[in-house]
Image (cartoon, rainbow, N blue to C red):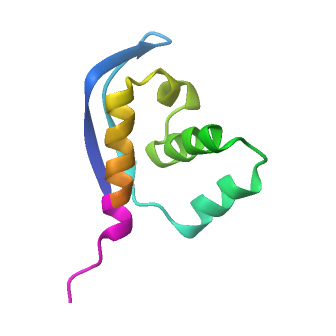
Amino acid sequence: MKEHIKLAFPIKLDGHEYTNLSMRRPKVRDRLMIDRNDLHESESEIHYFSHLCEVSPDVIEELDWSDFVQLREKLQLFLASRPSA
């Protein structure tokens, strides 16, 4: 399952314009992969989101802070959601 996040402030990087990102639901292995790297917490978060959105970390680094907060909020919704019975 992927969720689409419309960027309030689109970015241009390497000749490509990003107006939205698609984020997939995280798996345990995604978190383990990030935890195994010896990165500062903020760098770790950037790599985590780039992995879930399948874009370069450079894309995440270029986001406006409000768009980065949207990624965080979407992740929290993923983590809190449970399938209905």
Q: Residue at x 55, y 31 (%)?
A: 56
Q: Which residue is drawn at 26% across and 79% down?
A: 83
* Quarter placement of the C terminus: bottom left
Displayed quadrant of residue 67: top left
Task: Please give left or right for residue 8 compared with residue 29 in the image.
Answer: left
* Residue 79 is inside the magenta segment: yes
Q: Residue at x 33, y 69 (%)?
A: 80
- Residue 63, how many percent across, how many down? 41, 25
Q: Which residue lies furthest to the bottom in this view?
A: 85
Task: Please give left or right for residue 35 compared with residue 66 in the image.
Answer: right
Q: Is residue 77 visible?
A: yes
Q: Residue furthest top?
A: 15
Q: Can residue 1 be seen in this view?
A: no
- Residue 29, how many percent across, how many down? 61, 65
Where 53 sits versus 9, above or below? below
The part of the chain drawn in magenta is 77-85
* Quarter placement of the N terminus: bottom left
Q: Which residue lies furthest to the left in this view?
A: 84
